[in-house]
Image (spheres, coloured by chain):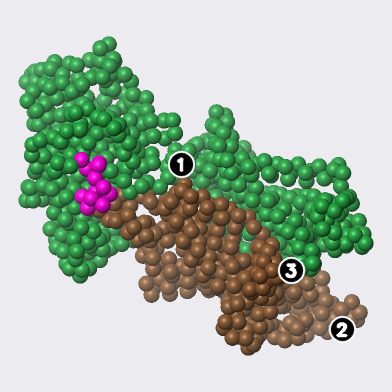
Chain colours: A green, B brown
Amino acid sequence: MKPAAAPAPVEAPVDALDAPPRKRERRSFLRLLLRNRLAGVGLVVLSAIVAVAILAPILPLADPNATAPANRLLPPLTPGHLLGTDELGRDLLSRLVWGTRLSLSMGVAATLVAALVGSTIGLVAGYAGGRLDNALMRSIDMLMAFPYILLALAIVAVLGPGLLNALYAVAVVNIPFFARNIRGVTVGLAHKDFVESARLAGMGHGRILVSEILPNVMPVIVITMSTTVGWMILETAGLSFLGLGSQPPQADLGSILGEGRKVMLTAPHVTTIAGVTIFLVVMSINLVGDGVRDALDPRLSAGALARPSAVTRIARPKSEGADAAAAPTGDHALAVRRLSTRFEIGARVLRAVEDVSFTIRRGECLGLVGESGSGKSVTALSLLGLVPSPPGVIRSGRVWRAGEDVLSLPREKLRALRGGRVSYIFQDPLGTLHPLFSVGDQLVEAIRAHRPASHAEAWTQAVALLERVRIPAAADRAEALPHELSGGMRQRVAIAMALANEPDLIIADEPTTALDVTVQAQILALLDELRREHGLALLFITHDFGVVSQLCDRVAVMYAGRIVEEGPTAEVLAAPAHPYTRRLIACVPILGSGRRALDAIPGLPPAVDALPDGCAFAPRCPRATGACREGEIPPISVADGRAARCLYAGEVMREAREGSAA
Amino acid sequence: MHLYIAKRVAALVPILFGLTLIVFFIMALIPGDPALAILGAYATPDNVARLNAQLGLDQPLPVQYVTWLTNLLQGDLGRSYSLNRPVLDEVLERFSATAILAGAALVLCTIFGLLAGIVSAVRQYGLADKAVTLAVLVGISMPSFWLGLLLILLFAVELRWLPASGMYAIYGGGDLPDLLRHLILPAVTLAAVATGVVARLTRSAMLEVLRQDYIRTARAKGLPERRVIYVHAFKAALVSIIPVIGIQAGFVLGGAVYIETVFQWPGIGRMLVQAISTRDILLVQGGVLVVAASYVLINLLVDVLQSLVDPRVKT
């Protein structure tokens, strides 16, 4: 009854396939399924119904086909007839149990037939590819060009009414769902290494399909079965209801309902009992099916399907240290104090940003550097509450701007600040611009969100903005959709959008990472120029120390969610005070020097849900001692305006100076 | 744009051709002798042979197909022997009743499905979301033919608000209000399942879109949350919702079979069920062909609509 839901089950299985279930995961799958209370209820109801249907022959039931005209249309709860009788005096309870048995077996049989034929077509098409694939899938498409039930009717018209014929008809119309789902997965598997090696080992195609591919496709087949069996039961019941399925005296739930319809006005209990039963069967199957699909979808357990709210959840302790709670003095565009942002997924807590403090002065460019996963983007998003929550939570800290804590602002004031005084530029301009609105319209929106202006006025300003970021033929380009522009042009649009309301501060999160090197240089030059021209402050986030050295006045280095070193760019570059910074600088290829000091850092950054005690870099640090692995290491001031979270900061610095002098 | 539509229209030709092939050959597979079915069990072999020759059934199948297709292109679908009138006349008349019913159901499921889905996504895990999720579950598990009977019992028998059957407006009797009164119950019944499917898909499409980077951008540039959800997220979600509404069109066209039987709506679905019982093959053939062709045209409309929302598909 719901062929339209077919596209939905396609996605989950493909995702689920990436990680074939292992034993441990299988147990957690059951737990996940049962954690879903609705699925649990469905499972209980379905098991009860199936048990009764299986046990029908040994249950103390009356003969479902024994007519007794004297007892016709007895109401429910009549002695001897718990659910009453139908228009021929037959015991309804007995007919119901036997009808359920028949409906269930028809639905299951139709599902098996559809699964067998459809999966075979899908496997062969996906594995063979080329012409055979094309021919098979075109025929499947033709089948799908018919409205679902109509095709079943046409098939019954050909074969004639009858139970088996209805079963075949329902099976045939469901073949396309299996064929498409299974083909999709098989195509992905057909060129995987293990299949290629089986082929090289001289295995025949048939054997490869059965022994290599089928086991991997099985979960998808099972999921498709669990999502289609409900409609197949509904469909067969429907055909019987129309008198095209089971023929008297044999009765499934659909024909009981159909027969009851004739006496609906005098004895509504007949249709009600049959209808409720069909409903319960299908509903419990759907509940279990949804539960299976959700349990197999890794995104759900990761909380990734939750809708991010407009503002990050903020849950800070009532009283915080005085250094965080007091508004900082001095001339700053933004001052961050002891900020901690975490991702809380069930019992797991990822400390993405931990105790981060920094200050951006007016008109200054501060570089925030670190490897991917170091927490620099989360820091940037936390500043205006843009971290998606769930699962993000700001657990502590203040973000000061113009004497106010941004994170305490009422929503409307925060909204006005976003894109107003403080604006963002993100990394991938294809993903971060709306794909269906012209870039001009997106600029117009940015303008009109903050200033009253007619669409025409705003459009003129938008074109002017595009000119300011040196987009040629700006008036024409404003009409373009993002995908019609090059990567560099898109990033210029993003910059124009950030400039739209003359901000004091732009937060640029890896704005050049997705671009070609030559385009990178242009964009950097443009940003630097605009910054100086407008006197705006810039928080520049990057993993590339080379870019920092060109652009930034000061630099803060992040590792595992913390700022491990901060100071004026030139000084940090000349003599890093933290071993991690030193390694990071060594990663920058030295142009024109004839030698590349591409010295990768051994080891990997720690997972932020399992941070070691003490310095998080200690496991990768050549200098680490026992002291590094204990307790909190606070920022240690090493020079005027410079600090590093390293017990040996002074020595590291001295060593670096001597090293570079040597 | 025009080029895109022209291309899509051109692509219809092979699909429609394929439809005629399938319909013709499915019907040709029917076991037994159609002439015998028409003449009855007491026909003499002579009569049967003469009728077969008259119907062209003694020709090889490909020849029969060409003849049938030629006639079809001239608007001749043959004559229904049970009704003794041209198949095309009967089918078109019945189809108009089905189109009214299915069209109304499609409008209902689109409006209510979208509304419920959006509310559900915006209030994820809230009370409204739970209510919608539950209603959707009930809706898609409900046998529509039973839902129809329940509505008849409640609104026609108990409350006497609306008629359970007797729609004659398409035959010239009754006016628009009368048609609408007859339309409400069957249209609601037919729309129930489809509404559930649209709501469910809208919810998941909205949730998917709301996680995208461009939504973060919209928030970062200070757009009000209303605009973020109802303009930015909704427009992007429409890209995956529109095809599903297209599929629902096929679903309500097919599902009309049950609803027309329950409400005795004089549509093509009921005609087909009757024609199958009387083994009126030409009538079945014509009915299936017309409904399938209309579904193909609906899909064309859906594609064009899709290209209007998402200009990227044009390329």
Give the magenta part as a residue range: A405-418
On whether disc 2 and disc 3 are found on a single subunit, the reply is no
Give the prevailing secondary structure in the magenta stretch.
helix
Q: Residue at horizontal 59%, vertical 86%?
A: B175
On the question of residue A162 being in view, the answer is no
Q: Please state, as top left, top right, bottom left or bottom right, where the C terminus of chain A lies in the image.
A: top left
Quarter occupied by residue A95: bottom right
Residue behind mark 2? B47
Circle 2 Cα neighbour tier, 10 Å, few/some/many (<14 / 14–19 / ≥20): few
Q: Please tell me whether mark 3 sits on a helix, a strand or a loop.
A: helix
Name the subunit of mark 1: A
- Mark 2 to mark 1 CA distance (whole Å): 69 Å
The local secondary structure at tag 1 comes to helix
| Total numbered labels | 3
Indicate the secondary structure of the residue bearing disc 2: helix
Q: Callout 1: few (<14), some (14-19), or many (20+) C-alpha neighbours within 10 Å?
A: some
**Amino acid found under the numbered disc labelled 3:** Ala
Mark drawn on residue B19: none
Q: Amino acid at mark 2?
A: Asn
In this rendering, position of residue A335 left or right of residue B107: left
A2 over A294 or under it: above or below: below
Residue A412 part of the magenta-drawn span: yes
**Residue A617, percent from left and from top:** 27, 22
According to the picture, the residue beneath numbered tag 1 turns out to be A299
Amino acid identity at mark 1: Arg
In the picture of the structure, the residue carrying the numbered disc 3 is A157
Q: Residue at x 55, y 44 (%)?
A: A293
**Residue closer to the observer: A654 or A306:** A306
Give x and y (percent) for residue A169.
71, 60
Q: Residue furthest top?
A: A626
